[in-house]
Image: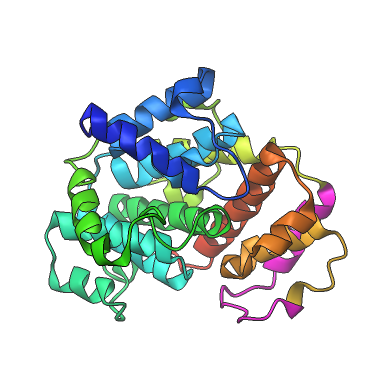
Amino acid sequence: MAPKPVRLALRRVLREVRHVRPVPFGRATGLVRDVYRQLERDFGMLAPPVALHSPSPPVLAAAWVMLRESLVAAGETSRADREVVASLVSQRNSCPYCVEVHGMALDSLGRSPEASAIAAGQAVTDPLDGDLSPAARTELTAVAFAFHYLNRVVSVFLGTSPLPSSVPDSAREKAKAILGRLLRPGSGAMPGESLDLLPAGSRDFSWAAGNPYVEDAFSRASAAFGSLAVSSAVRDAVVRELSTWDGSPPGPSRSWAAGAGDPAVRLALVVAKAPYQVDDALVAAAGLDDRELVELVGWASFTAAAHCVSLVPARN
């Protein structure tokens, strides 16, 4: 965990969140407080991609449980392997914020040739294409799932960089180096310690059977998203759209979603398939309050992430 003065400074980065007002650390109570404390302890800072969910405490907990038990908790794979997957998924989802964060993490772990290629935006072999044990494949698939989710949320609520907009261009490289050192990943937190933040789920994630902590984490998150008050119109439209989607980006135009008359349905569709197309006007047109917006974006992102993982061929 970063020193207290640094933690206090990093908490102010929540001011960079768009469209919703995250709960400040000093005002957090109940489930939000519990998640914030674990997040600072195990991730090193009150990371905006997680904390922005705080208007909906169950979604906040679900986002943290997925991230912690996939990327942070100790397991068979190394943190470097997981950061490679996080970076690759973020590149494919056109999420520059997450690419920059996890590029800094790779730097702090020591730049390998593969990490250098990722940081330069070059094509590299996907770690999930290799020969992996069932436990390793589960862990890396969990990271991919978590970042298909987080990339979508970040595209809606955050800008293109984790550095505050007040940092001048001339100081950005130095600031990135300092932040990278603060976020230097450790050897891994004990798995399973976040699970009690959410009620148990149905354990219906077949891809996660190689790791009981991961399976439990994503089952609990699934139950949390399934219980949200997202309209049947949104649910039906997103599920129908994803049922024929092969995962390819639909391009720069939103014409494919123009037929959705309800602005909330249109927002959910774009979040699910092309989060990089979300803009201020699309969010404003939906007319949702902070909790409603976090829950709609979270549900659409989770549903899309589950679909993206289902497209990866299973391997023995």
Residue at 24% x, 45% y is 183
Residue 316 seen in render: no
Left or right: 231 with respect to 113? right
Q: Position of residue 97 (x, y in %)?
A: 41, 61
Q: Nearer the viewer, residue 134 or 250?
A: 250
Q: Quadrant of residue 85?
A: bottom left
Q: Residue 287: say if magenta.
A: no
Residue 109 seen in render: yes
Magenta residues, start to end: 232-255
Quarter in which the C terminus is drawn: bottom left
Q: Nearer the viewer, residue 160 or 305?
A: 160
Residue at 40% x, 70% y is 91
* Number of numbered discs on residues: 0
Left or right: 261 with respect to 275? right
As drawn, 56 above or below 177 = above
Residue at 71% x, 76% y is 254
The furthest residue to the right? 261
Q: Quadrant of residue 66?
A: top left
Residue at 88% x, 64% y is 261
Q: Position of residue 92 (x, y in %)?
A: 44, 72
Left or right: 251 with respect to 141? right
Q: Position of residue 250 (x, y in %)?
A: 62, 79
Q: Nearer the viewer, residue 84 or 172?
A: 172
Left or right: 95 with respect to 226? left
Q: Residue 252: say if magenta.
A: yes
Quarter in which the N terminus is drawn: top left
As drawn, 130 above or below 237 = below
Say how the picture is coloured. Answer: rainbow
Q: Position of residue 190 (x, y in %)?
A: 26, 31
Q: Quadrant of residue 46?
A: top left
